Image: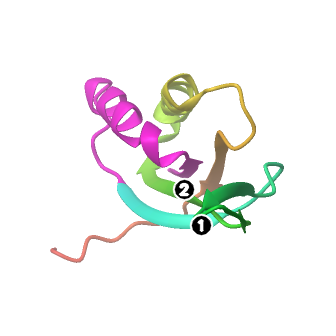
């Protein structure tokens, strides 16, 4: 099993989520996060003054999936979250040693 963590632009969440569900991958956890990478931050105008925002709002999608599904899921996320600009996000993949259901 693998854990996939994808950090993407918030405005791309619905598009990515819909495509994952359509592909049969419905189980996910979504968290609002903030961070920076190569984008470094953005300058906004507020009441005539420039404000530097160095931690950009992002969304983190977490999924634990079978090994055979990893490449398809990564492909869906990359395809639906891509804009071609800095700040599109990152996808991380980790090994999962075990998973235990709380319900059972």
Q: Residues within 10 Å of mark 1 (few under 14, many from 20)?
A: few
Q: Is residue 62 left or right of residue 37?
A: left
Span highlighted in magenta in the image: 1-28
Most extreme residue toward the bottom is: 102
Disc 1 versus disc 2: distance between alpha carbons?
5 Å
Most extreme residue toward the front is: 48
Does 90 appear above or below 99?
A: above
Depth order, front residue of 71/88: 88
1 and 2 marks in contact (CB < 8 Å): yes
Q: Is residue 49 left or right of residue 47?
A: right
Does 40 appear above or below 85?
A: below
Please give the name of the residue rendered at 46% of the width and 52% of the height, measured from the top-left corner.
61
| Disc on res. 34 | 1
Q: Is residue 66 left or right of residue 2?
A: left
| Disc on res. 58 | 2
Residue 16 falls within the magenta-colored stretch: yes
Q: Could you say which quadrant of the image residue 12 lies in?
A: top left
Element under label 2?
strand
Q: Could you say which quadrant of the image residue 52 lies in?
A: bottom right
């Amino acid at each position: 099993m693998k854990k996939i963590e994808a950090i993407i632009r918030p405005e791309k969440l619905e598009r990515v989520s819909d495509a994952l569900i359509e592909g049969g991958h419905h189980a996910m956890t979504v968290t609002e996060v903030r961070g920076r990478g190569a984008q470094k931050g953005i300058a906004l105008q507020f009441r005539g003054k420039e404000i530097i925002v160095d931690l950009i709002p992002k969304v983190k999608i977490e999924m634990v999936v079978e090994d055979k599904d990893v490449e398809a899921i990564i492909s869906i996320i990359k395809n639906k979250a891509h804009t071609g600009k800095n700040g599109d996000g990152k996808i991380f993949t980790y090994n999962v040693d075990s998973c235990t259901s709380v319900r059972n």
